[in-house]
Amino acid sequence: MHLTRRTDYGLRLLMLLAVDDDAPVGLNDAATRLEVSANHLAKVAQALVHAALIRSIRGRAGGFMLLPQTREATVADIVEALEPMALVECFDDADACTLSPMCRLHGALAEAKQSFLDSLRRHTLADLVARRRAPLLRLTRKQE
């Protein structure tokens, strides 16, 4: 399984927001601190807003903030919100492959995907930052 850059950036942004939750984090500030493209991060942030994982605050002092319930979101919840989960074309369209009526690959891949997600369901966003909060906070603080 290979997660896209979109999911990678989304997980990083959520971790940043989870450890730096005292005020909204601006897009450019987050992109600089995470060392990622601001344009790409903007698209990811919009997807996270749409998935009701973060909120966007407009204005000069605006930015992005974690929604309270997001701390308990599992890594699987986050991955499913950001990642296209169709491992092969027939996951979305059974008619996409002429082998579909007799193929057992779909079932094997579906089982593997389910195992992958089940493993990620054992970890929440809070778990990802709990033990490493102080070092993560130092790494993600604005350079003054």
Image (tube, grey):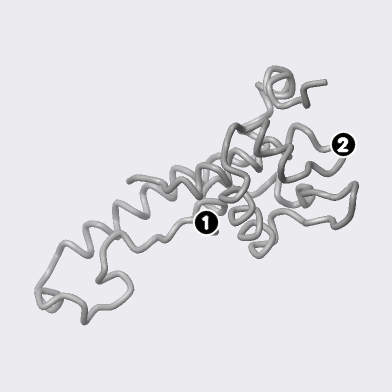
* Location of residue 75 in the rendering, given as x and y in whole percent from the top left corner: 55, 45
The label number, if any, that marks residue 82 in the structure image: 1
Q: Kindly report the distance in space between the C-alpha atoms of the residues bearing marks 2 and 1.
A: 25 Å
Amino acid identity at mark 2: Asp
What residue lies at 62% left-to-right and 33% top-to-bottom?
34
Q: Nearer the viewer, residue 140 or 54?
A: 140
Quarter of the rendering occupied by the C terminus = top right
Q: Secondary structure at mark 2?
A: loop
Left or right of 35? Residue 79 is left
Q: Along the horizontal axis of the image, is 74 left or right of 57? A: left
Residue situated in front as seen by the camera: 42 or 12:
42
Amino acid at circle 1: Leu
126 horizontally vs 106: left or right = right
Q: Quadrant of residue 87?
A: bottom left
Q: Residue furthest bottom?
A: 95
Labels 2 and 1: the sequence-earlier one: 2
At a point 69% along the width and 35% down the height, the residue shown is 16
**Residue 143 x %, y %:** 77, 22
x, y (%) of residue 108? Answer: 21, 57
Residue picked out by circle 2: 22
At mark 1, the secondary structure is helix
